[in-house]
């Protein structure tokens, strides 16, 4: 079981703040994105366009970061300070 | 992370007193000659629109962790004596305090550099989001005050 | 010089409140997004000697005039919204406030630049002198905290 | 009559904080320095070595600034902030 968290406008897009997902084996962030895309295509699109950062256990993750059972994955839209 | 470190970092609903934060930082050393402070406040105008209220949301634990990392790196890299960082969440009215960074040092130069770096780093790395309420509704925004 | 300008400049014996000064500056505009503050405080150590007390003296009228010039040039040259400057004179204990510069702006960048320029300019051009009391006596000193 | 003011350590050197001086005609800062040097050689030395700034009516003066009757001249040792 992993925990998925959505913040700011992503709560509206995902229509939830948090959900739990059963995973049989460890998966990559990329594989998780594919799973999310099926239920919420708009989320998948934003992830592919790099509009969202993804953290695993409160550390920034890359597409090939491995997610294990018990991990917390968060979808982070751009922060209030922007990137400038 | 030590208790000392944690007490210099705060994400909170309540307002804070700049004077009280500075006085707390003064207690760390008798050799402080310069203190640079950055205070971010709620602006009325954003991209030409009048804002009536701001609302901040954060990713608990991760945001605090990022602020602690910024503080530690600032002390290590710039040779300041100490730094404290406070960010408010929840509703913020125009003119109210949002974020405070206090950098203390023996001399002024390093406190300016560390303070300016820390606020830029906070905005770049800390999971905090801002929602603006205007006459046309509410929107999650990015900007760089 | 207008009354408004004069009220933003002060050379005084009494201590000041950073919070009160910031709140007074906030009243100038509803479009302030960033406030950079520099606070100079009394350090215990100077060139390896322990200081027990500091004492500041100024050239009345000329010192105030220089501070007003710094404020006006900072507003004009850096595009900040406003600036206030306070310098204390008389006896100052270790850890006490000596000088405060508050720069307000729509965005943070110009407030850092203006504030750092103003404290450097104050130290370069304003007729204020510092006497340090150590175990070996009293001496008029120059330094750059 | 012109007013001369001494600050910080110069009060000790000049053994006064303020004095008044009668001048028949306008004189330059350089000429005033010569007069001061006669009564207080140490002051003259510091002025020549540029250790002291001189202001006339609260504005920084140069050696050839003209001093008129009624002017206030101040002898300013290096400020507390140094010059760096």
Image (spheres, coloured by chain):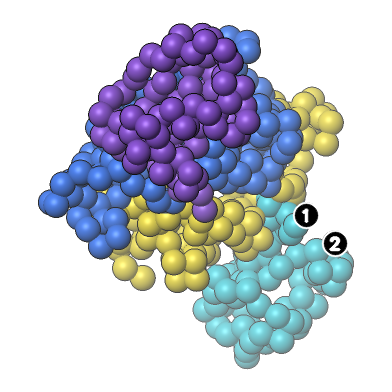
Chain colours: A cyan, B yellow, C blue, D purple
Chain bearing tag 1 is A
- Residue C55 location (% of width, % of height): 27, 35
Task: Decide: is B36 above or below A53.
Answer: above
Q: Residue under circle 1?
A: A13
- Residue B121 location (% of width, % of height): 61, 61
Q: What is the distance, in whole Å, between disc 1 and disc 2 at their CAs?
A: 7 Å
Q: For this rendering, which residue is in front, A32 or B87?
A: B87
Q: Identify the mark nearer the N-term, 1 or 2.
A: 1
Residues tagged by mark 1 and mark 2 found on one chain of the structure: yes
The disc label shown at residue A42, or none? 2
Tell me the element at label 1.
Answer: helix
Relative horizontal placement of residue B58, taking residue C105 as reference (left or right) = left
Residue A44 visible? The answer is no
Q: Residue at x 48, y 22 (%)?
A: D73
Location of residue A17 by image quarter = bottom right
- Residue C78 location (% of width, % of height): 72, 38
Tell me the element at label 2.
Answer: helix
State which quarter of the image contains the N terminus of chain C.
Answer: top right
The mark total stands at: 2
Q: For this rendering, which residue is in front, C40 or C134?
A: C134
Relative horizontal placement of residue C92, taking residue D62 as reference (left or right) = left
Location of residue D77 by image quarter = top left
Q: For this rendering, which residue is in front, B55 or D17?
A: D17
Task: Decide: is A44 above or below D32.
Answer: below
Label pair 1/2, CB-CB below 8 angstroms: yes
Location of residue A58 by image quarter = bottom right
Q: Residues within 10 Å of mark 2 (few under 14, many from 20)?
A: some
The disc label shown at residue C142, or none? none
As drawn, which residue projects farthest toward the bottom? A25
Chain bearing tag 2 is A
Q: Residue at x 15, y 47 (%)?
A: C137
């Amino acid at each position: 079981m992993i925990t998925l968290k959505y913040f700011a406008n992503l709560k509206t897009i995902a229509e939830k703040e948090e959900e739990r997902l059963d995973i049989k084996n460890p998966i990559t962030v990329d594989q998780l994105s594919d799973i999310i895309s099926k239920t919420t295509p708009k989320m998948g699109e934003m992830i592919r366009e790099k509009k969202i950062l993804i953290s695993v256990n409160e550390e920034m993750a890359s597409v090939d970061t491995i997610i294990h059972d018990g991990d917390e994955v968060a979808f982070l839209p751009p922060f209030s300070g922007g990137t400038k | 992370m030590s208790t000392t470190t944690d007490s210099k970092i705060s994400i909170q609903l309540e307002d804070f007193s700049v004077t009280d934060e500075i006085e707390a930082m003064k207690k760390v050393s008798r050799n402080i000659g310069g203190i640079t402070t950055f205070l971010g406040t709620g602006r009325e105008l954003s991209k030409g629109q009048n804002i009536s209220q701001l609302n901040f949301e954060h990713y608990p634990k991760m945001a605090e962790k990022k602020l602690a990392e910024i503080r530690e790196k600032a002390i290590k890299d710039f040779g300041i004596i100490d730094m404290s960082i406070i960010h408010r969440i929840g509703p913020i009215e125009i003119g109210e305090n949002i974020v405070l960074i206090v950098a203390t040092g023996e001399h002024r130069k390093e406190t300016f550099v560390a303070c300016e770096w820390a606020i830029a780093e906070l905005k770049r790395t800390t999971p905090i989001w801002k929602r603006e309420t205007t006459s046309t509704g509410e929107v999650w925004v990015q900007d760089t005050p």
